[in-house]
Image: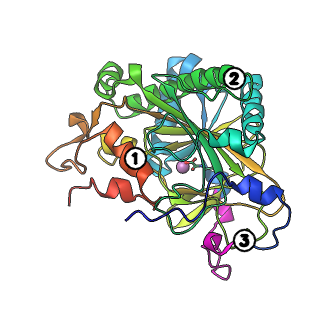
Amino acid sequence: MATAPFFSLPHSIKHLSDSGALSSVPPHYACRDPDAPSDVDPTLEGQIPTIDLSVLTEGDPARRSEMVRQLGRACEEWGFFVVVNHGVPETVREAMLAAAQGFFDLEEEEKAEHSGKHVMDPIRYGTSFNTKVEDVGYWRDYLKMVVHPAFHSPAKPLGFGEVLGQYAACTRVVGMELLRGIWESLELDEGYMNNALGLDACFQVCTVNLYPPCPQPELATGLPPHSDHGLLTLLRQNGVDGLQVKHGSKWVHVKPPPNSFLVNTGDHMEIVTNGRYKSVLHRAVINGRSTRMSIATVVAPSPDTVVEPVAQLVSSERPAMYRGVRYREYLEHQQGNKLREKSALDLLRVQ
Ligand code: OGA
Ligand code: NI
């Protein structure tokens, strides 16, 4: 049931944090038990798979096949991997971070032009995840922009759209290259998959997350455990760590190597592969010292595609595990409700 927002816009976490007067978090943000034993396993960090994209794009056939196999294993065992040699110029990646910082540095009133509307609006600025339905707040401001098949960008700050356009195009190429390898790892035909998922008109959204320093980082959180909609999410951050992914029963704190993308599988990967490659749970933790910024780019089927398990991965031994759903409807549901683990995907499971 929707209740009145507990947090009146245009206030943002940045605004709260910049005021400098905070020595504790407002009660709505205290959603963690500071005395709970740590669920992070530091020994797993070194085991996160790394995918060298240049081997997928240019490698000789034998090296490519081996990398495809590693990619498949990363999807199956982790749903998460680091991508290096991805070909996206560092200048483009840096420019995107600077542009995002420029947006968050605008006056609250200017940012608020993009806030408080429908979850399917192509440009959406806000705080937490969905203040209309949540009873807790997350220590995060965000700007979400649909960048494909139609491109949307705020007009301010000056030059933002140009940088975003470049970043979106480059990351889309990386996403498509990874998808090509992923289909191959499952012996699925690339042309068939592109067609079935409408990937020429793929849906792509860029989310810029800002996590200001928090006076009580042990009580609040940036984003709670959740999986992403879509097929793949590519993430880069500003050099401040905070992403944690779930592996088995433990959480892994991710420290990305320089010039890399962090990639996770999304709910629609799980649906289309009939559960062979599951979407991974992840969360964002915050800290008391530094502002963290991340840019997450989701690559997804075209909005009107009905996404369902592909016939090749359905058999009498492994019947379809999910009902088909139109991507647009899934997205609207996921964005319109509380962010809770895999609750949106759970609704589609065939019991
Ligand atoms: C997201 C997300 C994690 C991060 O935007 O969906 O999971 O590290 N972000 O910012
Ligand atoms: Ni996420």
The amino acid pointed to by label 2 is Val
Vertical placement of residue 171 versus 242, above or below? above
**Distance in Å between CA atoms under marks 2 and 1:** 28 Å
Q: On residue 267, which mark appears? A: 1
Q: Residues within 10 Å of mark 2 (few under 14, many from 20)?
A: some
Tell which tag, 2 or 1, sits nearer the viewer: 2
Name the residue tied to disc 3.
25
Residue flagged by tag 1: what amino acid is it?
Answer: Asp
Mark yes or no: residue 66 visible: no
Three-letter code, disc 3 = Val
Front-lying residue, 62 or 251: 251
Q: Secondary structure at mark 2?
A: helix
Residue found 47% across the figure and 37% down from its top: 121
Count residues near mark 3 (Cα–Cα under 10 Å), then give few for <14, some for 14-19, many for 20+. Answer: some
Q: Can you identify the residue that label 2 sits on?
A: 163
Q: Earlier in the sequence, mark 2 or mark 1?
A: 2
Along the viewing direction, whichever of 345 and 177 lies nearer the viewer: 345
The numbered mark, 3 or 1, whose residue comes first in the sequence reads 3
